[in-house]
Image (cartoon, rainbow, N blue to C red):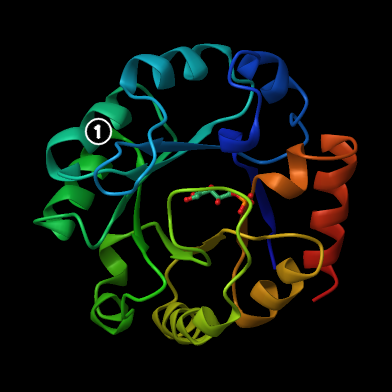
Amino acid sequence: MPVRINPSILSADFVNIERDIGRVASADFVHVDVMDNHFVPNLTFGPQMVGRIQDVSPLPLDVHLMIEDPDRWAPGYAELGAYSVTFHAEAAADAVGLARRLREIGARAGIAVKPGTAIEPYLELLTEFDQVLVMTVEPGFGGQSFIESVMPKLTALSAAVSTSGLDVWLQVDGGVDENTIAIAAAAGADTFVAGSSVFNSGDPAANIAALRAAADLV
Ligand SMILES: O=C(CO)[C@H](O)[C@H](O)COP(=O)(O)O
């Protein structure tokens, strides 16, 4: 199984983002959390900052939009050159239309679901998405505990992806560390967003290697 480790720069030093991205160059993608203080009770940055991150990052960007009205704003992140743009199912007016627009621009299209959002409606729509993000915390803040009770959503997604034969990546985000990554991998996740466990202690490159090894054991 391919394993992708995407460090979340929500846990980076915001005045040294370029330096911190350099420290995670052994990862697969840089995960960029855009929060608008409306969809979630936290605020990060918008397209101007993401464009500069895109300019300096040696890794492609995996942009996670925790914003209202993604139908209006998400295409702009694809136009900046983001490799993938993921918007929330709970916020999109026309999720399929938006995913098609993102693909037309050239980005992978992702849909995210909060812990309390059912996955069943999206199992039938897998042809429309390149990745599905199952949130393993309530979106908004780093450093929260992994919610294991959402794992059945990954099991259902994994079975549906296998049956379809599609190349849809299954991502988890929130509370991912050396222990919980194995739980998520066993449930079918292949793409792992990690903030605190990469940046908050020790050497980020060693932390990425440890996460990759723990997921690979499954
Ligand atoms: O989307 C997010 C929060 O909404 C973050 O990407 C996520 O929480 C990562 O942080 P940590 O690994 O510390 O949980």
Q: Residues within 10 Å of mark 1 (few under 14, many from 20)?
A: some
**Residue 1 image-quadrant placement:** bottom right
Q: Which residue is mark 1?
A: 105
**Position of 108 compared to 72: left or right?**
right
Determine if residue 30 is in view: no
**Residue 122 horizontal/vertical position (percent):** 28, 75
**Residue 23 image-quadrant placement:** top right
**Residue 121 horizontal/vertical position (percent):** 23, 80
Residue type beneath disc 1: Ile
Question: What residue is at 33 percent from the left and 24 percent from the top?
Answer: 46
Q: Nearer the viewer, residue 186 or 2?
A: 186
Question: What residue is at 66 percent from the left and 14 percent from the top?
Answer: 16
Image height of 164 relative to 14, above or below: below
Image height of 149 relative to 168, above or below: below
Question: What residue is at 14 percent from the left and 44 percent from the top?
Answer: 71
**Residue 13 horizontal/vertical position (percent):** 65, 23
**Position of 48 compared to 20: left or right?**
left
Image height of 9 relative to 217, above or below: above
**Residue 171 horizontal/vertical position (percent):** 53, 61
**Position of 60 compared to 196: left or right?**
left
Q: Nearer the viewer, residue 40 or 154?
A: 40
**Position of 17 compared to 135: left or right?**
right
Q: Nearer the viewer, residue 6 or 42?
A: 42
Q: Residue furthest front?
A: 41
For the image shown, how many numbered marks are present on the structure?
A: 1
Q: Which part of the image, by quadrant, shows the C terminus?
A: bottom right
Question: What residue is at 86 percent from the left and 48 percent from the top?
Answer: 209
**Residue 42 image-quadrant placement:** top left
